[in-house]
Image: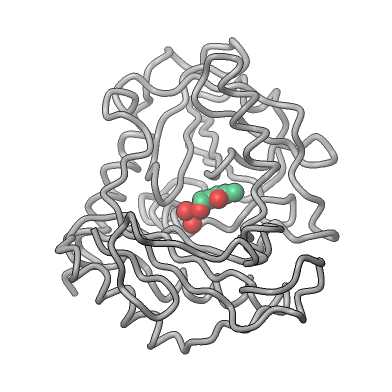
Amino acid sequence: QWVYVNGEYVLKDDAKVSVYDHGFLYGDGVFEGIRVYNGNVYRLDEHLQRLYESAQSIMLNIPHTKEELTNIIVETLQKNQYRDAYIRLVVSRGKGNLGLDPFTCGKPGVIVITEQLALFPKKLYETGLEIITVASRRNRPDVLSPKVKSLNYLNNILVKIEASLAGVSEALMLNDQGYVAEGSADNVFIVKGNTIKTPPGYLGALEGITRNAIVEIANELGYKMVEEPFTRHDVYVADEVFLTGTAAEVIAVVKVDGRVIGNGAPGEHTNKLLEAFRKKVVEEGVK
Ligand code: PLP
C-alpha cells in the first residue's frame, strides 16, 4: 500500500515524518477526510476549498496548487488501485525547532493516505447507534473557529474517550451555551414530523460536506429543512436522529442518554435520506 509523503510515494511501513514536524509536536496543521466512490473523488472541490480556508485561517501556506493536490490524490489512488476508498489529506506546519513559533518551520508537510476504511460496522447501519452527550465542549467560534479542520482534535478525542467509557461508539458535543453542536467527527440532524433540523455553523460545528449534501437532498425531497439551534431536549423528543460524515455517511441514532428515539430503530426518513445520498454519490461521479 502506497502513501504519499512530502513528494515521494513510499510503502505504508516506510511512511515516516520528522519528530520536529509541528504537526506532530503541536497538532499544527490542517486535514481533510475524503471519499472515493466508484473511481470518483466525491466533492473534491469542496474539500479542497475547506482545506485552503482552514490553512488560510491559521496562516499556513499550502505548497501546492489545488490542481497539484488533485494530481497527487489521483496518483496515490491509482498506485493503490482503489476505486472505493477513504483519503486522508494532511498538511502540517513542517519541520521547525522545538518552540511553538511556526515561523521557524520550513516547508509544510503534505501527506496523502488512502485506505479502504469503514467507520462503523455494517450491522450498526441496520440497528442504529446508541450515543450519549458529553461534557467536552466545542471550541467557541471566536477563539479557534470550528470551521478550521485542524490537526488539533483533542476536544474530539475527549468525546471519544467519554463515549468509549460509557460503552457507546459515539457522542454529541454541546457548544459553550449548551446547544447541541455535533458528534466527535460527524454532524447531527433531528427529524420531527416533516421538519429536519441541523445546528447552524455559527453554533460551533464543522460545515460538513456530507451535512451540506444532506441539506440539499432534504430540500429536494420536499422536507422542511432548517438550520437552527436546538438543545438536548429536542434531541430526546425527536422522531428520528442521525449523524452524517464522510466516513460514516448517514447513520441512524436510536438512543441518546438512555432515551429511546422514535421506535428504537432507524427511521423511515433517515433510511430515505441515506438511500438518496448513496444514489447521488454515484450519479455525481457519472456526469
Ligand atoms: N465534524 C467534525 C468535527 C469532523 O471532523 C467531521 C469530519 O470530517 C465532520 C463533522 C463531518 O464532515 P464531513 O461530512 O465533511 O466529513
- Residue 226 shows in this picture: no
Which residue sits at x=71%, y=58%? 26
Relative to 260, does residue 133 appear above or below in the rendering?
Answer: below
Asked if one can make out residue 28 in the rendered structure from this viewpoint, the answer is yes
Residue 44 in which image quadrant: bottom left
| Count of numbered circles in the view | 0
Vertical comparison of 228 with 258: above or below: below
Q: Which residue lies at the image location 38% right of the left edge and 38% below the top edge?
A: 119
Quarter of the rendering occupied by the C terminus: bottom left
Q: Position of residue 104 (x, y in %)?
A: 75, 80
Seen from the viewer's position, the closer of residues 202 and 14 is 14
Image position of 129 with respect to 17: above or below = above
Looking at the rendered image, the quarter that the N terminus falls into is bottom left
Q: Tell me what residue is drawn at x 53 percent, y 86 percent.
A: 63
Q: Is residue 214 left or right of residue 84?
A: right
Q: Which x, y percent locates residue 194?
A: 48, 37
Tell me: residue 215, above or below residue 196: below
x and y, in percent, of residue 180 in the image: 70, 37
Nearer-the-camera pick, 4 or 198 = 4
Q: Quadrant of residue 270?
A: top left
**Residue at screen point 79% across, 57% down:** 141
User: Which x, y percent locates residue 34?
Assistant: 39, 60
- Is 118 displayed left or right of 153 in the figure? left
Q: Specify how the rendered protein is coloured.
A: one colour
